[in-house]
Amino acid sequence: MKRQRVDKIVSISGLIIAVVIAVAGGLLLWGGTFAHNTVTTELTTQKITFSEDATKLPPELQSWAGTQVTDGPSAKAYSDLIAVHVAGVAGGKTYSEVSEEWMAGGMKDATLAQQRTTLFMGESLRAMLLNAYAFWTVGTVAIIASFAAFGVAIALLILALLGFRHAKEVE
């Protein structure tokens, strides 16, 4: 087979692969942006805000004072704040531990019932905020991957064009 023909086949293949990777990059960018926009929209409508008074926050969260929860990192930080509060409800016991104790006692202890409800709400809120954080993180990874895909597509496009040029130069 002639060198010119090989150059054309390889260049066309590279061009096709570049287009496929560019389309994948576009889809990754769309998905990542969609995840970020959805998380931001949903969290913003909840109007969750850290206390303005930094002294009311644990030391590791004081930098968040007065900040509204609108993205993944702030959702993670607020879930950490809820974890601190939840840990103080029943001496560090979890919802399932308190619930089991309440049911074993015939479901009559009002204090355990209140702790159970508070723990359930706190742990549920934490789970939802951590879910937002997870989707934000997946969105961020998708956006980074899209840039990598665009870089690879551009490199393949350049190589394909160089291959076509080389095919014209050889016999």
Image (spheres, grey):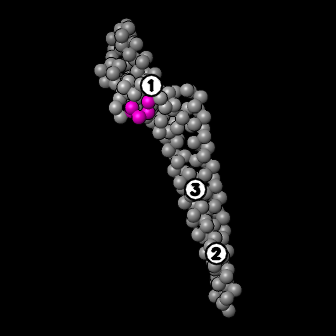
- Whether residues under marks 1 and 2 lie with C-beta atoms below 8 angstroms apart, the answer is no
Name which residue type carries label 1: Ser
**Residue 81 x %, y %:** 40, 29
Query: Residue placed at 39% from the left, 12% from the top?
Result: 113
Name which residue type carries label 3: Ser
* First-in-chain label (1 vs 2): 1
Query: Residue placed at 45% from the left, 25% from the top?
Result: 51
Which disc number belongs to residue 146? 3
Distance from Cα at disc 1 to Cα at disc 2: 57 Å
With 90 as the anchor, is 139 left or right in this view? right
Q: Is residue 77 above or below residue 106?
A: below
Mark 2 lies on residue: 160
**Range shown magenta:** 61-65
- Which residue lies most toward the right here? 168
Query: Residue placed at 64% from the left, 80% from the top?
Result: 163
Q: Nearer the viewer, residue 99 or 49?
A: 49
Q: Nearer the viewer, mark 1 or mark 2?
A: 1
Looking at the rendering, which quadrant does residue 122 occupy? top left
Name which residue type carries label 2: Ala
Q: Residue 18 magenta-drawn?
A: no
Mark 1 lies on residue: 51
Q: Is residue 49 above or below residue 159?
A: above
**Residue 131 x %, y %:** 50, 36
**Residue 77 x %, y %:** 43, 34
